[in-house]
Image (cartoon, helix red, strand yellow):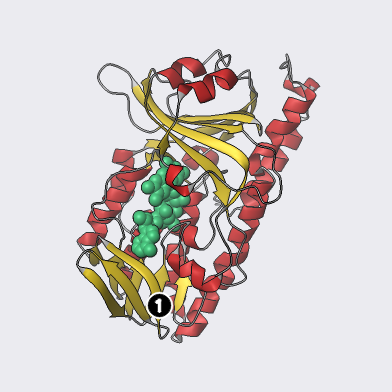
Amino acid sequence: MKILIAGGGIGGLTAALALQARGHEVTVLESVREPKPLGVGINLLPHAVGVLDGLGLLPALREMAVETSALVFANKHGQAIHRDPRGLAGGYSHPQFSIHRGELQMRLWREASAKVTVLSGQRVVGVRDGNVALIEAADGPREQAADLIVGADGIHSALRKRLAPDEGPPRWRGVMMWRGTSWAPPFLDGKTMVQAGHSQAKFVVYPIGAPRADGLQLINWIADRRVHEATPGLTAPDRADWSRAGRLGDLLPTFGGWHFDWLDVPALITRAEQMLEWPMVDRDPLPRWQLGPTTLLGDAAHPMYPIGSNGATQAIMDARALADALTNHADLGTALAAFEDERRPLCARIVEMNRREGLDAILDRVEALAPEGFTRLEDVIDPAEVATEINRYKAAAGHRVRTT
Ligand SMILES: Cc1cc2nc3c(=O)[nH]c(=O)nc-3n(C[C@H](O)[C@H](O)[C@H](O)COP(=O)(O)OP(=O)(O)OC[C@H]3O[C@@H](n4cnc5c(N)ncnc54)[C@H](O)[C@@H]3O)c2cc1C
């Protein structure tokens, strides 16, 4: 089948590789003229790593990424509330990886370019007659027909607009995120991801590379802060600002006093080699992704708050599910319906769970009960209850611990 994918991000490129492996003739059209390793750190959950392993990429991931040993939940004083072993240590079939988003995208880009047609500087702006993509290219407009067109064109997807023409901009509920990377001494075991604080002010931190010769490690961090009450109709800062450089002055008044036993947050922030500011946005789940011989995947289909390491993970899961559905069903309409049945309810559930703070709800409970910290966690909250709540989120989000 001839398949055209709009968007050469992590979802689109993984889909290209998965579909090519099943014998399809794939073309990826990416709007950016010159792809660069943009973004900072992301986490790939074991189920997504399993998909990339199936595409032969596990050795490359091991080289580029840090194998995450655990996710630690902590209060704003850095005291641990819960330690959740991750990847192989957590009983999964595959590791969890903390990785630089841009480097992963470039690796997938090279891999896909060797196997399918990958073109940059090609913006897909619409579809004519069901299966003809309308493209704005550097040398003028053009059209390209395919048996299937996949919109993997991110949160501002042009193809999603065909399904939700009146949707408007992404939804913002008043939280800004500052994402940065800093070279700093390793913390804890040098492989742990930590989320500390609560929903009004939260600091997520994890390393994304091995220590270099001077012992310093590239540490990725995300500082979230509520800057507006969540009022109906609140609109996010202009889209043009989404990759705006952040300022220390926006963070230090909130995080300047967060000196943990195991990490000095203001010192880390102050050493940032890059710091970007983004609004935390998502969109309402769609009632369908399919329109004739077109469908959506990744952020185009289900943009969600970046809680629980689901952004790239779910895009990768979509890629394999689409390839499976096209293998299992000869009829395209039936295959797209099967793909959507498998993926749409699960992703809608994650969007909703993340709006209710997802895994981080536990942080709010501990903050409300013990804002000054604690001597013994058991005096504040039952640790078994914390574990149950975290396991419930993980099960709903598709984590599968190995049973044999
Ligand atoms: C530049 C950038 C930086 C990011 N940085 C981070 C980060 O640091 N941390 C994090 O957690 N998440 C980040 N994300 C988001 C994260 O990559 C996604 O949530 C996740 O990987 C799902 O990927 P996706 O492929 O669905 O979407 P995306 O990664 O957004 O990829 C979509 C791709 O489609 C291209 N595109 C857009 N419109 C069109 C069009 N009309 N025609 C053709 N191509 C189009 C875009 O240029 C992009 O390459 C970033 C996304 C981008 C685009």
Coordinates of residue 324 in the picture (x, y in percent)? 44, 71
Mark 1 neighbour class, 10 Å CA radius: few under 14, some 14 to 19, many 20 or more: some
| Res 4 seen here | yes
In front: 279, or 218?
Answer: 279
Judge left or right: residue 151 versus residue 82: left
Coordinates of residue 382 in the picture (x, y in percent)? 78, 30
Judge left or right: residue 318 versus residue 234: left
| Res 305 seen here | no
Is 51 located above or below residue 251 in the figure? below
SS of the residue under disc 1: strand
Coordinates of residue 385 in the picture (x, y in percent)? 76, 36
- The quarter of the displayed image where residue 219 is located: top left
Which residue is under mark 1?
127
- The quarter of the displayed image where residue 4 is located: bottom left
The type of residue carrying mark 1 is: Val
For the point 39% across and 17% down, the residue is: 185
For the point 62% across and 54% down, the residue is: 351
**Which quadrant of the rendered structure holds the N terminus?**
bottom left
